[in-house]
Amino acid sequence: MKSVHDMGVAELAAALKSRALSSREVTQGLLDRIAAHDKQLGAFLHVDADGALARAAAADALLAAGNGGALTGVPLAHKDIYVTADMPTTAGSKMLDGYRSPFDATVVARLNAAGTVSLGKLNCDEFAMGSANENSAYFPAHNPWDLGRVPGGSSGGSAVAVAARLVPGSTGTDTGGSIRQPASFTGITGIKPTYGVCSRYGMIAFASSLDQAGPMARSAEDCALLLSAMSGFDERDATSVEQPPQDFHAQMVAAREGASAGKPLAGLRIGLPREFFPAGLSSDVNAAVRAGLAELEKLGATLVDVSLPRTELAIPVYYIIAPAEASSNLSRFDGVKFGHRASNYDDLLDMYKKTRAEGFGPEVKRRIMIGTYVLSHGYYDAYYLQAQKLRRMIADDFQQCFTQCDVIAGPVAPTVAWKQGEGKDDPTQAYLADIFTLPGSLAGLPGMSVPVGTGAGGMPVGLQLIGNYFKEGQLLHTAHALQQATDWHRAAPSGL
C-alpha cells in the first residue's frame, strides 16, 4: 500500500471505508509530515494536532459501526479565511491575530458534518488580497517545486499543503483566480464553482460579488467529492443559489451521449479564445497548454476558435470593483467590535486611524484607498458604474462563446510561478498575471485548473477550463477524462 501522504481523497476514503487504514493512523502520519516539512514550506498558520486526533477517533468509531459517509475520516485543512469555532482565524492579517469565532463557516461545518478531519488553518494573502501569498502578515508560503518561487495566491497555503502531500485536499477561495492560479503554479487540481453554489457565510469577505469557495486536491475526482459536500443552498447567505444538493462525483463519471470508452469526450466542443493565446504568452506555458489540448482532442473533443474581445478590460474592471467592495467590507475592522485595537490613542477617531494603520498591511491599505476613491462623490459614475457596465458586457461575451462551444479552455496564467520578491516593487505586475482568470470571475462562471505538464525550470503548468453557469459536472467530467488518460496530475515535487 502507498504511504498515506501519497494517497488522494478518493483513495483514502476507500481505504478508510474498507478499514485497511484507520483515520487516526492517517491523521497521525500527516501530522508527522507537517511537523517535518512545514517549517520550510509555510503552508500552515495553525495546526490543531490534539483536536485532529480526537476527530479522527470519532470518525473511526463511526466507520467501525458502519455509519461512515463518503468522506468520513479523511483529513483536510482550511484556508484561514474561513472562521472556525475551535481554531483561531486570522485571514492572514495582524488585524485578526488570535481571533476566535463563535461559529464555523458553512463550508467548514458541512465538511465537518461529512466526517472530514480538520488538521488546521492554512496560510493566505492578507484578507485574500494577492497573487503570490507574499502578502500574508505572518510569513510567505513557498512553492514545494522550488522553495525560491511563489506558490500563487491568495490560496497559496492551501495549494502548498496539497502539492507537498501534507494533506490530500484543502479548501480555498477564488475572487479573481485565487484557486486556479495557485493550483496551476503548484501542479494540483482546483475548481471554483459558479458564484452562489457554495455558501459565503463565515468566509471573511473581500469582494462580496466575486468571492467563492472551492476545493483544491490532487485530481478532479477528489475535487468532485469535496465539492459535493461543500456546496448547497444556505439561507444565511443572501447570494446562495437555491438549488437541490448536487452529486458532482456522479456527474463526473456519467458517460456523455454518443461517447465510447476510447472517446469519452466525443461531441464536446472546446472553445479556444484567441485572446487567451496572445503573443506575450510564455512559450513554455503555451507548449504545455497545447499538449493538454491535444490530449483532449485524442479523447474525442473538438477544438473551436472563439473570441472574448473584452479580455484585456477585465483587469481594470476587476481592480475597480474588487477594491470598492473591499473598502466597504473592511470598514468593520475598526478596533471597536473585534480584532486588533491600538493600545495608545487620544480619542475615538484617533483609535480608528491607529488601529487600521497598525492592523492592515500595505496591499490591503492600497486596495482600501483605491476602493474608497472610486466610490467617492464625483468618481462613482466615472469609475465604479462604468466598470459594472463593462462587467455585464464581459459576461455577455461568454454567453456568445457558449453558443459555439461547451467548454472554454486556455492557460491559467501567462507564465509559470515567478521567484519570490519579483513583484514587490511593482504590485501592478502581479495584477497583470490574473488576465486569464479574471474574466470568468467577473462573469460568475465555474472554472478550474488541471495540471498539463511543466514549463521553465520544471515548474508546473495548469490548463484552465471554464464552463457555463452550473456546469461544474461537465468541467469535472472533462478534467477526469484527461486525468484518466494522462499522469500529469500524479507528478509530485521531489525532496519532500
Image (tube, rainbow, N blue to C red):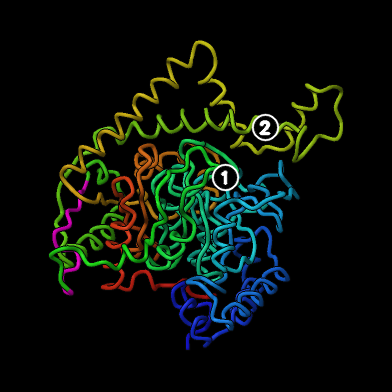
What residue sits 65% from the left and 78% below the top?
Answer: 28
Instruction: Name the side, left or right, on which 187 lies relative to 64.
Output: left
Instruction: Name the side, left or right, on which 430 lies relative to 142.
Output: left
Inspect the image, locate mark 1, and give the three-letter code of the amino acid beneath it.
Tyr
- Tell me the element at label 1: loop
Inspect the image, locate mark 2, and give the three-letter code of the amino acid beneath it.
Arg
Q: Which residue is mark 1?
A: 201
N-term-proximal mark, 1 vs 2: 1
Magenta highlight: main SS = loop
From the viewer's side, name the closer residue of 191 and 455.
Answer: 191
Q: Position of residue 110 (x, y in %)?
A: 55, 58
What residue sits 39% from the left and 66% below the top?
Answer: 458
Q: Quadrant of residue 386?
A: top left
Is residue 120 found inside the magenta-colored segment of the image? no
Q: Are marks 1 and 2 in contact (CB under 8 Å)?
A: no
Crowd tier of the residue under label 2, counting other residues whose Cα lies within 10 Å: few below 14, some 14–19, many 20 or above: few
Q: Position of residue 272 (x, y in %)?
A: 21, 48
Q: Which residue is mark 2?
A: 332
Q: Do we see residue 284 in this rendering?
A: no
Instruction: Name the side, left or right, on which 175 lies relative to 264.
Output: right
Q: Quadrant of the C terminus?
A: bottom right
Q: Quadrant of residue 348?
A: top right
Is residue 269 found inside the magenta-colored segment of the image? yes
Crowd tier of the residue under label 1, counting other residues whose Cα lies within 10 Å: few below 14, some 14–19, many 20 or above: many
- Tell me the element at label 2: helix
From the viewer's side, name the closer residue of 397 and 146.
Answer: 397
Q: Do we see residue 376 in this rendering?
A: yes
Report the mark closest to the observer, 1 or 2. 1
From the viewer's side, name the closer residue of 437 and 421.
Answer: 437
Q: In the image, which residues are magenta?
A: 261-272
